[in-house]
């Protein structure tokens, strides 16, 4: 199982002075510094950044050019086809482009590829179908940056292609020099492309789409502020759903988007909130990442993502409710299938003795190919190393990978790219296709190429500070809300407490994965801890050591009008 290395932050600053300047507790000032926020302007933006701090769309290379082309196509009454992707980001980006083009009076429709029959992104079949149906312009979202051959093919058929994407640009490398393979589109909008001076490249595809619609609204005389009003909540949803880092511009988008989403005017989103029992609730990034988002993603995995798009496009809440309920039920089925896949993967690791490998390549032929990425993520959490899960697709073996902080998945795959018929991704996640007979060769080569020592594969646990339970009070925890939204790139505060002794334990729920523990600290004070995870392992550790060190985060729990402190255990040793 996975190893952990604990690190206590040791970053220095005048926390008392920062606290006084911004009217915050010095502990909160330390937490901000631990997140590498330095300087008065940066702290001010982190704590109080507003929509006025978002970057101008025109700063993104290709945005103005793409907006001018689209406005010209509207004036010429040309047919535009949006080609999206089957995940949350792709669906939200398609919604933004379709709704925005409708508002400026353009003729546009949407095609979302089927995960299994079409695969990811542009392909010749989609281009040929568009051409036969009289489409003049293809507008991609959340895909297209790797579609240079397909873009050329569309041009040969007399079509215009505009690419909007946020993924890494493919490249060829010779003698240490990279040659980037940009698609020869009429306009390319991707903050990661060479020569783009946009200040923050870590945005998702839906935010790129929103930026383009802001520029288009300006050209059309509607104004970019109207586009922000129309699409902020969808861009925020996609940012969390696509696991973008919640820093810089993303932090502002998500903070304000969540507020807007809790009172959304979109009938489909209102229906989804209702069936997930979140109507009227204050929403957090957690609700998108673990409750709402999986419902939208499930349809793209098990059926077609067009159903998720239809939910968002439905003009009436009563008509949207049955769709939302279907998506919720589909997600419940997806959870069951995922758990079966995780168990099959663990069995394979045991039977084939793969536990000592630095990179796990798991071939599960009968696994639903759309669940490979989720299963890879779960196994990565359990074993703390890069994981590829491969399964049989219609055209050979397909797979998805999920990585760890120390291992750049896309870079490592590029070293053995000759094995793949198709591959792509970024540092933390990737997708691939290859012939079945190459699976053993891939497993051997990716393992052999891995230069990480086993100790480097240990998961890094970043602790903000050692703080006994008794130092935590309600006023401090309430100030933690200034640091939200929490998520990738802006983690929840984490503290450590040493020599914790167990007094009583209770295991709750049918799954047995929730535990309530009464403990005593070094000062012989009693506290209640909650732990979500494998309870037997925790109890065994206590039984063996008597006193253990723990990491935790504090939160306020309100029940029947009474608010009390709750300490949630995260790690132990």
Image (cartoon, helix red, strand yellow):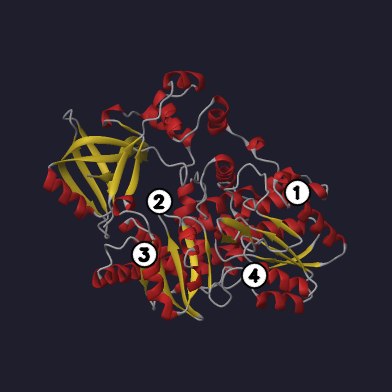
Residue tagged 2: 406
- Considering only vertical position in the picture, is 207 above or below 35? below
Say the numbered circle drawn on residue 405: none
Please report whichever mark, 4 or 1, sits nearer to the chain's N-terminal start: 4
Decide which of 307, 66 is in the foreground and name it.
Answer: 66
At horizontal 53% and vertical 58% (from top left) the residue drawn is: 272
Disc 1: which residue: 215
Asked if marks 2 and 4 touch (Cβ < 8 Å), the reply is no
Mark nearer the viewer, 3 or 4 = 3
Q: Nearer the viewer, residue 566 or 108?
A: 108
Say few, some or many: other residues with alpha carbon within 10 Å of mark 4 (under 14 / 14 to 19 / 20 or more): many
Asked if the residue under mark 1 is in contact with the one under mark 2, i.e. CB atoms within 8 Å, the reply is no
- Label 2: few (<14), some (14–19) or many (≥20) C-alpha neighbours in 10 Å: some
Q: Residue 467: horizontal and vertical position, in percent?
A: 29, 30
> Residue at position x 62%, y 63% from top?
143
Q: CA distance from mark 1 to mark 3?
A: 46 Å
Sequence-first disc among 2 and 1? 1
Mark 3–mark 4 Cα distance, whole angstroms, equals 31 Å
């Amino acid at each position: 199982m996975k190893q952990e290395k604990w690190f206590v932050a040791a970053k220095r600053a005048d926390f008392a002075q920062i606290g006084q300047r911004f009217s915050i507790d010095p502990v909160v000032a330390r937490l901000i510094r631990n997140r590498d926020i330095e300087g008065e302007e940066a702290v001010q933006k982190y704590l109080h950044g507003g929509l006025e701090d978002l970057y101008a769309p025109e700063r993104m290379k290709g945005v103005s050019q793409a907006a001018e082309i689209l406005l010209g196509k509207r004036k010429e009454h040309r047919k535009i086809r949006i080609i999206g992707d089957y995940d949350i980001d792709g669906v939200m980006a398609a919604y933004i482009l379709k709704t925005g083009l409708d508002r400026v009076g353009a003729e546009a429709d949407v095609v979302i590829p089927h995960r299994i029959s079409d695969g990811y992104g542009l392909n010749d079949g989609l281009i040929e179908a568009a051409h036969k149906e009289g489409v003049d312009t293809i507008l991609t979202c959340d895909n297209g940056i790797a579609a240079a051959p397909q873009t050329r093919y569309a041009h040969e058929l007399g079509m215009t292609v505009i690419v909007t994407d946020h993924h890494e640009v493919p490249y060829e490398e010779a003698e240490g020099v990279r040659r980037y393979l940009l698609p020869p589109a009429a306009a390319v909008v991707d903050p990661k492309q060479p020569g783009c001076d946009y200040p923050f490249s870590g945005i998702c595809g839906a935010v790129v789409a929103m930026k383009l619609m802001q520029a288009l609204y300006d050209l059309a005389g509607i104004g970019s502020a109207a586009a922000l009003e129309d699409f902020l909540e969808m861009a925020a949803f996609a940012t969390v759903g696509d696991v973008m880092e919640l820093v810089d511009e993303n932090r502002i988008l998500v903070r304000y988007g969540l507020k807007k989403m809790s009172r959304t005017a979109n009938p489909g989103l209102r229906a989804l909130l209702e069936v997930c029992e979140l109507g009227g609730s204050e929403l957090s990034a957690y609700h998108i990442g673990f409750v709402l988002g999986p419902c939208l993603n499930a349809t793209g995995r098990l059926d077609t993502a067009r159903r998720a798009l239809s939910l968002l496009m439905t003009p009436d809440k009563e008509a949207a409710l049955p769709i939302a309920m279907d998506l919720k039920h589909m997600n419940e089925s997806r959870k069951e299938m995922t758990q079966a896949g995780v168990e099959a993967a663990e069995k394979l690791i045991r039977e084939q003795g793969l536990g000592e490998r630095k990179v796990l390549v798991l071939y599960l032929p009968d696994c639903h190919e759309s669940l490979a990425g989720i299963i890879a993520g779960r196994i990565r959490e359990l074993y703390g190393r890069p994981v590829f899960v491969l399964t049989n697709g219609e055209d050979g073996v397909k797979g998805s990978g999920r990585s760890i902080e120390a291992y750049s998945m896309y870079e490592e795959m590029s070293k053995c790219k000759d094995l793949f018929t198709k591959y792509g991704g970024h540092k933390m996640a990737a997708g691939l296709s290859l012939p079945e007979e190459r699976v053993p060769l891939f497993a051997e080569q990716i393992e052999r190429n891995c230069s990480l020592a086993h100790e480097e594969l240990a998961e890094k646990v970043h602790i903000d500070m050692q703080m006994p339970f008794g130092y935590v009070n309600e006023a401090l925890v309430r100030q933690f809300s200034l640091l939200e939204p929490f998520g990738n790139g802006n983690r929840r505060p984490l503290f450590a407490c040493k020599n914790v002794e167990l007094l009583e334990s209770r295991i709750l729920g049918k799954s047995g994965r929730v535990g309530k523990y009464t403990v005593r600290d070094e000062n012989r004070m009693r506290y209640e801890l909650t732990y979500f995870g494998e309870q037997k392992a925790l109890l065994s550790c206590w039984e063996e050591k008597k006193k253990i060190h723990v990491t935790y985060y504090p939160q306020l729990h309100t029940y029947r009008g009474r608010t009390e402190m709750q300490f949630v255990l995260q790690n132990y040793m």
